[in-house]
Image (spheres, rainbow, N blue to C red):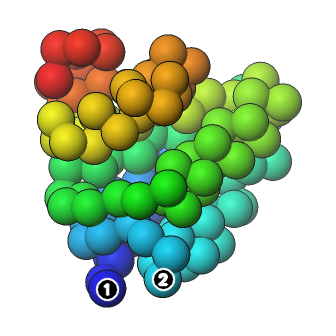
Amino acid sequence: MKINIEILDKSDKQAEAFISGEIDAYTAPKLKEALDGYQNKENFTLKVDLSDVGYMDSTGLGVFVGLFKNLRTKNSELVLMGLSERLYRLFEITGLSEIIEIKNIEGETNGNI
Protein backbone atom coordinates (compact mmCIF):
# COMPACT_ATOMS: atom_id res chain seq x y z
CA MET A 1 0.00 0.00 0.00
CA LYS A 2 1.48 3.28 -1.13
CA ILE A 3 0.39 6.91 -1.03
CA ASN A 4 2.08 10.09 -2.18
CA ILE A 5 0.93 13.47 -0.88
CA GLU A 6 2.02 16.82 -2.26
CA ILE A 7 0.53 20.03 -0.88
CA LEU A 8 0.96 23.44 -2.47
CA ASP A 9 0.01 26.52 -0.48
CA LYS A 10 -1.49 28.82 -3.12
CA SER A 11 -2.08 31.72 -0.70
CA ASP A 12 -2.94 32.28 2.94
CA LYS A 13 -6.55 31.42 2.01
CA GLN A 14 -6.07 28.39 -0.28
CA ALA A 15 -4.04 25.21 -0.67
CA GLU A 16 -4.17 22.35 -3.11
CA ALA A 17 -3.25 18.77 -2.25
CA PHE A 18 -2.36 16.19 -4.88
CA ILE A 19 -2.84 12.62 -3.74
CA SER A 20 -1.72 9.52 -5.61
CA GLY A 21 -1.81 5.84 -4.77
CA GLU A 22 -4.28 4.13 -2.47
CA ILE A 23 -6.17 5.43 0.54
CA ASP A 24 -6.87 2.59 2.94
CA ALA A 25 -6.38 1.57 6.58
CA TYR A 26 -2.60 1.64 6.13
CA THR A 27 -2.24 4.95 4.30
CA ALA A 28 -5.18 6.98 5.71
CA PRO A 29 -3.28 7.98 8.90
CA LYS A 30 -0.50 9.48 6.77
CA LEU A 31 -3.07 11.42 4.71
CA LYS A 32 -4.86 12.63 7.84
CA GLU A 33 -1.58 13.79 9.36
CA ALA A 34 -0.60 15.65 6.17
CA LEU A 35 -3.93 17.52 6.03
CA ASP A 36 -4.37 18.15 9.77
CA GLY A 37 -2.59 21.51 9.69
CA TYR A 38 -5.29 22.97 7.46
CA GLN A 39 -8.23 22.11 9.73
CA ASN A 40 -7.85 25.16 11.95
CA LYS A 41 -7.59 27.81 9.23
CA GLU A 42 -10.49 30.22 9.01
CA ASN A 43 -12.09 31.24 5.70
CA PHE A 44 -9.84 28.82 3.87
CA THR A 45 -10.30 26.57 0.84
CA LEU A 46 -8.55 23.22 0.67
CA LYS A 47 -8.71 21.56 -2.74
CA VAL A 48 -7.79 17.88 -2.89
CA ASP A 49 -7.00 16.36 -6.27
CA LEU A 50 -7.70 12.62 -6.27
CA SER A 51 -7.03 12.05 -10.00
CA ASP A 52 -4.26 9.57 -9.28
CA VAL A 53 -5.99 7.65 -6.48
CA GLY A 54 -6.80 4.15 -7.69
CA TYR A 55 -8.48 2.87 -4.55
CA MET A 56 -10.13 4.22 -1.41
CA ASP A 57 -11.90 2.37 1.38
CA SER A 58 -14.05 3.53 4.30
CA THR A 59 -11.04 4.74 6.30
CA GLY A 60 -10.30 7.17 3.47
CA LEU A 61 -13.89 8.37 3.54
CA GLY A 62 -13.52 8.88 7.28
CA VAL A 63 -10.50 11.14 6.74
CA PHE A 64 -12.49 13.35 4.38
CA VAL A 65 -15.60 13.42 6.59
CA GLY A 66 -13.54 14.52 9.60
CA LEU A 67 -11.67 17.09 7.54
CA PHE A 68 -14.92 18.44 6.07
CA LYS A 69 -16.53 18.80 9.51
CA ASN A 70 -13.52 20.57 11.01
CA LEU A 71 -13.14 22.95 8.07
CA ARG A 72 -16.82 23.80 8.16
CA THR A 73 -16.62 24.87 11.81
CA LYS A 74 -13.98 27.42 10.73
CA ASN A 75 -16.08 28.76 7.83
CA SER A 76 -13.69 27.00 5.45
CA GLU A 77 -14.37 24.59 2.64
CA LEU A 78 -13.16 21.30 1.25
CA VAL A 79 -13.28 20.71 -2.50
CA LEU A 80 -12.53 17.27 -3.93
CA MET A 81 -11.42 17.14 -7.55
CA GLY A 82 -10.61 14.59 -10.22
CA LEU A 83 -12.47 11.64 -8.78
CA SER A 84 -12.73 8.58 -10.99
CA GLU A 85 -16.23 7.26 -11.56
CA ARG A 86 -15.47 4.52 -9.03
CA LEU A 87 -14.44 6.99 -6.32
CA TYR A 88 -17.31 9.32 -7.11
CA ARG A 89 -19.71 6.38 -6.78
CA LEU A 90 -18.32 5.70 -3.30
CA PHE A 91 -19.10 9.27 -2.24
CA GLU A 92 -22.48 9.09 -3.94
CA ILE A 93 -23.56 5.81 -2.28
CA THR A 94 -22.66 7.15 1.17
CA GLY A 95 -24.46 10.45 0.54
CA LEU A 96 -21.24 12.42 0.95
CA SER A 97 -21.50 13.81 -2.58
CA GLU A 98 -24.49 15.80 -1.33
CA ILE A 99 -22.50 17.61 1.39
CA ILE A 100 -18.91 17.72 0.16
CA GLU A 101 -18.21 19.76 -2.96
CA ILE A 102 -16.88 17.51 -5.73
CA LYS A 103 -15.50 18.85 -9.00
CA ASN A 104 -13.63 17.24 -11.80
CA ILE A 105 -10.37 18.68 -13.10
CA GLU A 106 -12.19 21.01 -15.51
CA GLY A 107 -14.25 22.45 -12.68
CA GLU A 108 -17.59 20.85 -13.44
CA THR A 109 -19.64 20.04 -10.35
CA ASN A 110 -21.30 16.88 -9.04
CA GLY A 111 -22.52 14.36 -11.56
CA ASN A 112 -20.49 15.70 -14.47
CA ILE A 113 -17.42 13.61 -13.95
Which mark identifies residue 38?
Answer: none
Residue type, numbered disc 2: Tyr
Look at the image and tell me whether residue 59 can be seen: yes
Residue 71 location in percent, x, y? 72, 37
Query: What is the count of numbered marks?
Result: 2
Image quadrant containing the C terminus: top left
Q: Earlier in the sequence, mark 1 or mark 2?
A: 1
Residue type, numbered disc 1: Met
Residue ID for mark 1: 1
Residue 7 location in percent, x, y? 44, 62
Q: Mark 1 and 2 residues: CB-CB less than 8 Å, in contact? A: yes
Residue at left offset 82%, top offset 32%: 74
Residue at left offset 84%, top offset 30%: 73
Give the class, few, some or many, for how many residues have Cα within 10 Å of label 1's Cα (few <14, many ≥20). Answer: few
Residue 27 location in percent, x, y? 46, 78
Residue at left offset 74%, top offset 28%: 72
Look at the image and tell me whether residue 44 can be seen: no
Residue 86 location in percent, x, y? 20, 42
Residue at left offset 35%, top offset 59%: 56
Residue ID for mark 2: 26
